[in-house]
Image (tube, coloured by chain):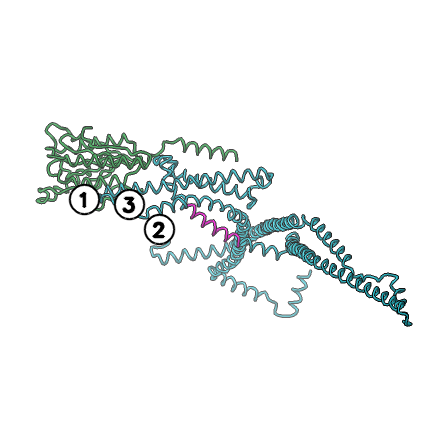
Chain colours: A green, B cyan
C-alpha cells in the first residue's frame, strides 16, 4: 500500500514538473501592399477585426506588410500579446484596432515588389518567440512573388508546426488566360510549406473565417 | 497445405476424403472408451467446478445478505433512536416550559381554593337569633289584658318593644344576606381563574400524553428493529431505496445549481487569477471558481453539522455546545463572505460581458448602440443569484447525508443481485456442460456408428452361438459359474 501511494505521488510530481503545454495562440498576418492589393485593405480590416474578436487573453497577434523586402522588423505594423485580465485585453484590442485603422487610412501607393518568403521568415521568427501552442501565418496576398533584383529567397524555409493559411488569393489577369498558373502558384506554396514542416490551407471566401482559427 | 493433406491418398479429392473419413472413423472407434471417459470427465469437472463456484457465491451471498440486514437495521436503529431522542426533547421542552411553572400554579390554585373556602365560610347562612329575654317578654306580652289601663299600656309597650326587636333582627339578617351575596359574587372570578388554570394543566397533560403515545410507537418499532424482524428489514430497505432516489434527484438539482453558480463566477475569476494559466487541461480561473463552490459546499456541510441537522462528522456532533455555537457563527460568516464575493463577481461578469459586447460591436463596425433601458434588471438578478446560490448549496449536506447512508444499502442490494445472477449463471453453465458431455458422447457414437453396428452384429452372432439350447446345458453352465 505504501509503495502504491509513493508511486502515485511520484507520478503526480513528475507530471507537475513536466514542461507545460502552452494553450496560447499566436497569429501573424501578412498583408500584401503591392500593386492593386492596396484596394483590398477593407477586406484585410475585416479579417483583423475577426481575429481580434476571436483571440483571447494570453494570445498574440502581429500584422506585417509584404513589400519589396519583407524580412524586416520595420514591416511589422502592429503587434500585441493580450494581457491575462480580460478587461485589459479588451482595451489592448481597442488600441490595436485604432493602430490598424490608422495604417489602412494612411496606405498610399503600393510597393513595387512582393517578398512573400521574407515575410514568412519574419513570421516564423516572431511566432517562435511567442512560445504559443498554436501558431498561424495568414497571408493576405495573390501569392505571386516578385523579388527585387539581388534578393535571395530560393532556399528551404522552416515553419515547424505552423498553420499557413492563404486568404483572399485573387486571380491575376494572366490566371484568367491560363488558370493553370493560379493552380501552380498554390501548389508551389503548398509544397514549400509542407517541406518547411507546416500545414497549408486556403480560404478565399471571407464568410468562412470561422474555419481560420480553432475556436475555444 | 490442407489440399495437399486432402489429396495424399488420391488425386481425386472425393476419394481421398472418403479414405480420410474411414481412417478417422476407425481411429475414433478404437479410441472410443478413453474418448468417452475424457468427455464425461471434462463435463463432470466443469459441472463440479461451477457447482463449487456457485456454492461459494451462495455463501458470499448469505454473508452479504446478513451484512445488508445489519446495515439496514443499524440505519433504522439510528433513525429510531434519533426520533425517540427528539420526542424526549419535546417532552423535556413541554415539561420545562409548562410544568416548571407547576409549583407556582399549584400554589395559585391552593390559594384560590383557600380563598374560596374562607369566602364560603364567611358566606355561611346563619340566621340571627332573637335575644334570650325575648321569650320572657313574649310570654309577658301575651298575658291577657284585664282592663287595667296601666297594665295594658305596659303590655302594649312590651309588645311594641318586641315587634321592634323582631324588625331589627330581620334587618340585620337582610344585611348579612346581602354581604354573603357580595362575597359569593366575589368568588366568581376566582372560580374562573381556577378553571383556566386547570384547563392549562389539562392541555399540558394532553400534550404529554400525545408525546408518550408517539414514544410508545417509536419504542415498538425500535424493539422490532432490535429483534431483527424480517418485516422491519423489508420496510427499512424499501424506505432506504426511496431515500436514495429522492436524494439522488435533489443532488442532481444541486449539481445543476452548482453549474449555474460556476458559470456566474468563472469568467470574472479570470480577472482575479488571470485567464492564461492552466493546471492540467483546465484553466486556473475555472479551478478557482470550482474551489470557491466546493468551499461553499464544505462550509454548508460544517454548518449543518454544527446545527446537528446532519451527522456526517461525529467529531463535530460530539463537541460541547459552546464550541458548536462558535463553529456555527464561523461557518455562517465564511458562507456569507463567500456569498458576497460571489455577488460581486456576478456583477463583474455583467460588466465584462457588457465591455466585450461593446468591443464586438465596434469590431463589427455597427457603431455604438444606445444602452438598454432595463439593463439593470439582469445585473441585479445575477447579483442576487450570486448571493443566494451559496446558501442554497449549503443545504446540499442534507440530501448528501441521505444519499451516503442509502447508498450503502443500495450498493449492498446491487452486489447481492449481481452475486445471485453470477451464481445462477455458474449453475447453468455447470448443468449445461454436463448435458453437453452426454450429448457429445452420443454424437461420438453417431460418428462411429458403422463400426459400432458391425461390432454389435458380431457380438450378437457370438452370443447366439454360445447360448445353450437345452435346459441340461443351461444347468451345466450355471453350475460352472457357481463353482
Residue position for label 3: B371
- Graded by Cα atoms within 10 Å as few (under 14), some (14 to 19) or many (20 or more), the crowding at tag 2 reads few
Q: Quadrant of residue B192?
A: bottom right
Q: Which residues are magenta?
A: B242-259
Q: Residue at point 72% right, 50% down?
A: B107
Q: Residue at point 67% right, 50% down?
A: B99
* Image location (x, y in percent) of residue B475: 67, 67
State the CA–CA distance, disc 1 to disc 2.
65 Å
* Image location (x, y in percent) of residue B454: 49, 62
Residue position for label 1: A204
Residue position for label 2: B4
Q: Quadrant of residue A183?
A: top left
Confirm whether the magenta stretch covers residue B449: no
Residue B236 appearing in the image: yes
- Closer to the camera, B433 or A9? A9
Are the residues tagged 1 and 2 within 8 Å (C-beta)? no
Give the answer, above or below, for where B327 lies relative to B150.
Answer: above
Give the answer, above or below, for where B426 lies relative to B468.
Answer: above
Question: Does dot 1 land on a helix, a strand or a loop?
Answer: loop
Mark 3 and mark 1, same subunit? Answer: no
Q: Of the residues under marks 3 and 2, which one precedes in the sequence? A: 2
- Graded by Cα atoms within 10 Å as few (under 14), some (14 to 19) or many (20 or more), the crowding at tag 1 reads some
Amino acid at each position: 500500500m505504501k509503495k502504491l501511494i509513493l508511486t502515485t505521488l511520484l507520478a503526480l510530481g513528475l507530471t507537475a514538473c513536466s514542461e507545460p503545454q502552452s494553450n496560447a495562440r499566436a497569429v501573424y498576418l501578412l498583408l500584401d501592399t503591392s500593386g492593386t492589393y492596396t484596394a483590398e485593405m477593407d477586406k484585410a480590416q475585416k479579417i483583423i477585426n475577426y481575429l481580434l474578436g476571436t483571440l483571447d487573453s494570453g494570445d498574440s497577434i502581429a500584422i506585417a506588410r509584404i513589400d519589396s523586402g519583407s524580412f524586416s522588423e520595420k514591416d511589422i505594423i502592429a503587434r500585441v500579446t493580450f494581457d491575462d485580465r480580460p478587461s485589459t485585453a479588451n482595451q489592448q484590442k481597442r488600441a490595436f484596432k485604432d493602430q490598424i485603422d490608422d495604417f489602412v487610412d494612411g496606405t498610399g501607393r503600393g510597393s513595387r515588389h512582393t517578398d512573400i518568403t521574407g515575410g514568412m521568415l519574419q513570421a516564423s521568427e516572431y511566432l517562435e518567440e511567442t512560445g504559443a501552442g498554436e501558431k498561424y501565418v495568414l497571408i493576405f496576398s495573390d501569392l505571386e512573388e516578385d523579388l527585387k533584383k539581388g534578393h535571395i529567397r530560393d532556399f528551404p524555409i522552416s515553419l515547424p508546426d505552423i498553420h499557413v493559411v492563404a486568404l483572399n488569393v485573387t486571380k491575376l489577369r494572366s490566371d484568367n488566360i491560363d488558370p493553370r498558373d493560379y493552380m501552380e502558384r498554390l501548389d508551389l506554396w503548398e509544397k514549400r510549406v509542407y517541406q518547411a514542416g507546416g500545414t497549408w490551407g486556403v480560404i478565399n471566401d471571407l464568410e468562412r473565417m470561422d474555419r481560420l482559427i480553432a475556436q475555444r | 497445405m490442407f489440399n495437399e493433406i486432402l489429396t495424399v491418398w488420391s488425386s481425386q479429392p472425393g476419394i481421398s476424403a472418403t479414405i480420410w473419413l474411414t481412417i478417422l472413423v476407425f481411429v475414433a472407434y478404437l479410441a472410443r472408451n478413453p474418448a468417452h471417459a475424457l468427455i464425461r470427465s471434462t463435463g463432470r469437472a466443469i459441472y463440479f467446478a461451477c457447482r463449487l463456484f456457485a456454492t461459494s457465491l451462495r455463501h458470499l451471498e448469505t454473508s452479504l445478505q446478513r451484512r445488508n440486514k445489519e446495515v439496514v437495521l443499524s440505519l433504522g436503529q439510528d433513525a429510531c433512536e434519533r426520533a425517540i431522542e427528539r420526542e424526549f426533547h419535546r417532552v423535556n421542552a413541554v415539561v420545562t416550559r409548562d410544568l416548571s411553572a407547576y409549583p407556582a400554579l399549584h400554589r395559585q390554585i391552593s390559594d384560590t381554593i383557600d380563598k374560596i373556602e374562607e369566602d364560603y365560610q364567611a358566606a355561611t347562612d346563619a340566621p340571627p337569633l332573637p335575644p334570650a329575654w325575648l321569650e320572657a317578654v313574649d310570654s309577658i306580652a301575651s298575658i291577657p289584658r284585664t282592663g287595667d289601663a296601666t297594665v295594658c299600656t305596659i303590655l302594649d309597650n312590651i309588645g311594641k318593644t318586641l315587634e321592634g326587636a323582631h324588625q331589627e333582627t330581620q334587618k340585620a339578617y337582610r344585611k348579612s344576606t346581602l354581604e354573603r351575596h357580595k362575597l359569593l359574587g366575589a368568588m366568581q372570578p376566582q372560580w374562573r381563574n381556577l378553571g383556566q388554570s386547570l384547563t392549562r394543566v389539562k392541555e399540558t397533560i394532553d400534550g404529554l400524553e400525545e408525546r408518550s403515545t408517539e414514544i410508545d410507537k417509536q419504542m415498538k418499532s425500535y424493539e422490532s428493529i432490535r429483534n431483527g424482524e424480517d418485516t422491519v428489514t423489508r420496510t427499512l430497505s424499501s424506505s432506504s431505496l426511496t431515500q436514495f432516489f429522492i436524494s439522488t434527484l435533489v443532488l442532481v438539482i444541486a449539481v445543476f445549481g452548482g453549474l449555474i453558480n460556476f458559470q456566474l463566477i468563472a469568467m470574472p475569476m479570470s480577472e482575479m487569477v488571470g485567464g492564461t494559466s492552466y493546471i492540467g487541461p483546465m484553466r486556473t480561473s475555472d479551478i478557482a471558481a470550482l474551489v470557491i463552490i466546493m468551499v461553499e459546499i464544505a462550509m454548508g456541510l460544517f454548518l449543518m453539522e454544527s446545527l446537528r441537522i446532519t451527522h456526517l462528522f461525529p467529531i463535530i456532533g460530539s463537541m460541547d455546545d459552546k464550541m458548536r455555537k462558535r463553529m456555527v457563527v464561523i461557518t455562517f460568516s465564511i458562507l456569507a463572505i463567500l456569498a458576497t464575493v460571489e455577488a460581486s463577481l456576478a456583477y463583474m461578469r455583467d460588466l465584462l460581458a457588457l465591455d466585450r459586447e461593446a468591443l464586438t460591436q465596434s469590431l463589427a463596425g455597427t457603431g455604438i448602440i444606445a444602452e438598454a433601458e432595463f439593463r439593470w434588471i439582469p445585473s441585479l438578478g445575477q447579483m442576487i443569484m450570486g448571493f443566494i446560490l451559496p446558501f442554497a448549496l449549503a443545504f446540499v449536506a442534507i440530501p448528501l447525508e441521505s444519499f451516503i447512508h442509502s447508498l450503502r444499502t443500495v450498493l449492498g442490494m446491487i452486489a447481492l443481485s449481481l452475486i445471485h445472477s453470477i451464481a445462477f449463471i455458474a449453475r447453468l453453465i455447470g448443468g449445461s456442460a454436463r448435458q453437453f458431455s452426454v450429448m457429445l458422447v452420443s454424437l461420438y457414437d453417431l460418428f462411429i456408428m458403422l463400426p459400432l453396428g458391425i461390432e454389435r452384429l458380431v457380438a450378437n452372432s457370438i452370443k447366439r452361438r454360445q447360448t445353450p439350447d437345452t435346459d441340461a446345458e443351461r444347468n451345466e453352465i450355471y453350475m460352472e459359474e457357481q463353482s
